[in-house]
Image: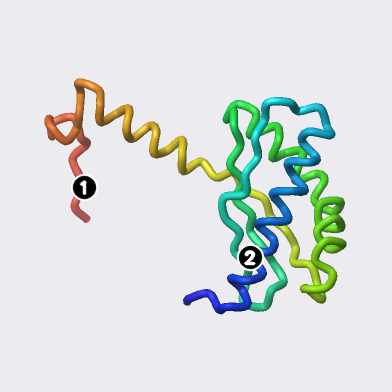
Amino acid sequence: MEETQRQKKIAGILQKDLADVLQKAATDGGLRGVIISVSKVTVTTDLSDAKVYLSVFPNKEAAELIKGIRSNTPLIRHELAQRTRHQLRRMPNLEFFIDDSLEYIERIEKSLKREDNPIKDAELLEKRKKS
């Protein structure tokens, strides 16, 4: 099912404001050298829930950082509600996830550059099981 214009608008507003809130919280919290970007926000059709995908650099900090963000979700939600009070009646429930798509792409590129390239040597791939 395709997103409505309203869902896209709300997702864009949340993405922009969340990036500001999280980056400010990271610098105020003493995390220097950590970059937090909101790569994607999806909102349900009833606008009650929002899934937020975060990209963290350096990646080794991601697990600990997402844990802290999830524990502070009510504070983040309140700050967002203050920022969007003229655009939204209700603030959606926020769920935070790590976006590891950049890491996934990097692993694919590394495996393609290696000598044991499965594209060049099909014997390296596992045989598919027919069901």
In the image, which is nearer the foreground, mark 2 or mark 1? 2
Nearer-the-camera pick, 68 or 125: 68
Q: Position of residue 84 (x, y in %)?
A: 80, 66
Crowding near the residue tagged with mark 2, few <14, some 14–19, many ≥20 C-alpha atoms within 10 Å: many
> Which label number is shown at residue 84?
none
Check disc 2 and report the residue beneath it.
Answer: 11
Which residue is at a point 87% across and 62% down the rendered structure image?
82
Is the residue 88 above or below the residue 36 in the image?
below
Distance from label 2 to label 1 (Cα)?
41 Å
Image x and y of residue 74, in percent:
85, 54
Residue 8 relative to residue 110: left or right = right
**Which quadrant would residue 52 be assigned to in this image?**
bottom right
Q: Residue furthest top?
A: 115
On screen, residue 8 versus residue 73, left or right, reads left
For this rendering, which residue is in front, 22 or 68? 22
Sequence order check, earlier mark of 2 and 1: 2
- Amino acid type, mark 1: Lys
Q: Residue at x 77, y 73 (%)?
A: 87
In the image, 75 versus 29, the foreground residue is 29
Q: Secondary structure at mark 1?
A: loop
Colouring rule applied to residues: rainbow
**Which residue is pictured at 80% across the width and 51% down the height?**
73
Q: Quadrant of the C terminus?
A: bottom left
Question: Element at badge 2?
Answer: helix
| The quadrant where residue 31 appears | top right
Mark 2 residue type: Ala
**Circle on res. 129:** 1
